Amino acid sequence: MKAYETVFILTPVLSEAQMQQSINKYISWLKKNGGDIVHQESIGLKNLSYPIAGKTLGFYYLIEFQAQALIIQHLETAYKRDERVLRYLIVRLDKHAEAYNEKRRQKLQERAAASSSEAKTEKAKETNHKPEDKADTAKDKNEPENTHNKIKS
Amino acid sequence: MTLVNDPIHRDLQQQRKKYCRFKKIGIRYIDYKNPDFLLKLVNEQGKILPRRLTGTSLKYQRRVAQAIKRARHLALLPFVADSLK
């Protein structure tokens, strides 16, 4: 099982439902063909540096997965057959790339945890008259590096 | 005309020490999905800057070039531009 990463660009004219449908199509294709999805990330709508197929915007989506090498060429044909995919790129990750991606995922999780705990402390202040207890429990769950929580509370 | 006894190359103390920014900081992987970082290694027209200007070592210059070409394929960076920065 080797580590791969694929980024594909969908046409911007699709509706939310259609985009989700396309994304799910590839996720389920990978799972059906023996791949493990490590990480998915919607990079979102971005302006393209040059027009592709007449479009100036694109919806970027990233999937990190582990799979057997033999399925990659079939993934490429699946991308080519799909009309909604403007561009695709499949990259094999070496050890440095994998380490970088793991670090990046950890940072994203920390940020997500920090923002969700901020929401929890705000809710506590609204409902409860004891915000300190809830804030302390939230801090214990989180990484100790979240200094901005302490500043706010 | 320069005088015969003047040094042609500035002595090392005057010359800015050129170093590879990746080796110095310890970066090992250059992410092609990060166009803001790659813009530093590209000139105003979008062309990849040569090693002698950026001071990058050969190993990392090759990785940089690969990352920039991937970013160009994904339209995160342009192939040709004017006044990029």
Image (cartoon, rainbow, N blue to C red):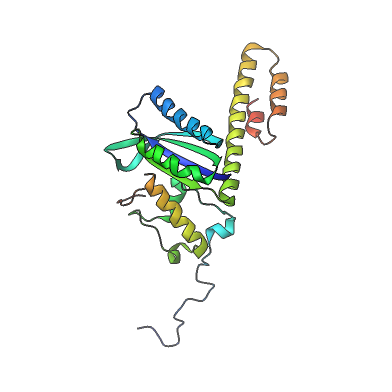
Q: Is residue B77 left or right of residue A149?
A: left
Q: Above or below — where is A12 with respect to A80?
A: above
Where does the image place residue B48, in percent across and percent down from the top left? 39, 58
Residue A60 drawn above or below residue B51: above
Q: Count of labels shown?
A: 0
Side (left or right) of A53 relative to A126: left
> Which residue is located at x 72 percent, y 28 percent?
A140
Q: Is residue A130 left or right of residue B4?
A: right
Rendered residue at 40%/27% (across/down): A19
Residue A95, how many percent across, how many down? 59, 51
The residue at the far bottom in this view is B4
Which residue is outermost to the left?
A54
Closer-to-camera residue (A90/A97)? A90
Q: Quadrant of residue A67?
A: top right
- Whether residue B69 can be seen here: yes
In this rendered view, identify the residue nearer to me: B80 or B16.
B80
The residue shown at (41%, 63%) is B50
The spot of residue B70 in percent (x, y) is 42, 49
Q: To which quarter of the image does residue A101 belong? A: top right
Vertical side of A68 occupied by A137: above or below: above
Q: Residue at x 36, y 34 (%)?
A: A82
Q: Quadrant of the N terminus of chain B?
A: bottom left
Q: Nearer the viewer, residue A59 or A8?
A: A8
Whether residue B33 can be seen here: no
Q: Position of residue A83 (x, y in %)?
A: 33, 34
